[in-house]
Amino acid sequence: MTDQLDRIDRKILSSLQADGRLSMAELASTVGLSKSPVAARVRRLEKDGYIRGYTALVDHDRLGEGHIAFVQVKLSDTRSAALEAFNKAVLKVPEIEQCHMIASSFDYLLKVRTKDIAAYRRVLGERISALPHVAQTSTFVAMETVKDR
């Protein structure tokens, strides 16, 4: 599907990734078109699923959610039903910010955000370890975020 995107579509996507609050006039000026064609392109990009939504970037430290841990998860069973059960259960754990299936010696990599290490320990012990088919976890605590796009 990416072959349907031209240079202007890609510029629109790049501009909106950098600042999702750009007005159509600002976006039009950035890509060198008038407002109407840009608005039509944005609607098409939304309809076709290239733009999945809009969100605000928040300061997690100020919200008391500054602790980040990455968790490698190895499952005891990797058949389709087990993967589906794990995936479904992960969606119900609000502290899990991201979940990626990985092609490696472990099965999933989770990004977990909590208030502090004590809160993380509770989430690990009570929620992550209790997810379906979890056999083993390894935790890596982030000391500093250098880039977070």
Image: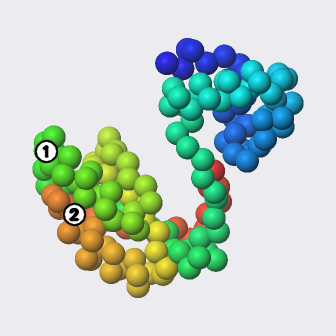
From the top left corner, tell me how far across and down residue 87 is, in percent.
Answer: 27, 51
- Name the residue: 59% across, 25% down: 44
Q: Quadrant of residue 32?
A: top right
State the residue at coordinates (68%, 24%): 40
Say the numbered circle drawn on residue 47. none
How far apart in space, not on screen, are marks 1 and 2 (Cα)? 14 Å
* Residue of label 1: 81
Sequence order check, earlier mark of 1 and 2 = 1
Q: Which mark is residue 131?
A: 2
Give x and y (percent) for residue 126. Answer: 25, 77
123 relative to 86 in the view: left or right:
right
Where is residue 116 shown, x and y percent of the image? 48, 81
- The foreground one among 39 and 99 is 39
CA neighbours of label 2 inside 10 A, class few (<14), some (14 to 19), many (20+): some
> As rendered, which of 111 and 4 lies closer to the eye?
4
Give SS at disc 1.
helix
Amino acid type, mark 2: Leu
Helix, strand, or loop for circle 2? loop
Label 1 neighbour load within 10 Å: few <14, some 14-19, many 20+: few
- Using the image as rendered, state which of residue 89 and residue 83 is in the foreground: 89
Q: Is residue 38 visible?
A: yes
Residue found at x 65% / y 30%: 42
Q: Quadrant of residue 119?
A: bottom left
Q: Is residue 30 visible?
A: no
* Image side of residue 80 versus residue 100, left or right: left
Number of numbered callouts drawn: 2
Query: Tag 1: residue type?
Result: Ala
Q: Are marks 1 and 2 in contact (CB under 8 Å)?
A: no
x and y, in percent, of residue 39 in the image: 71, 28
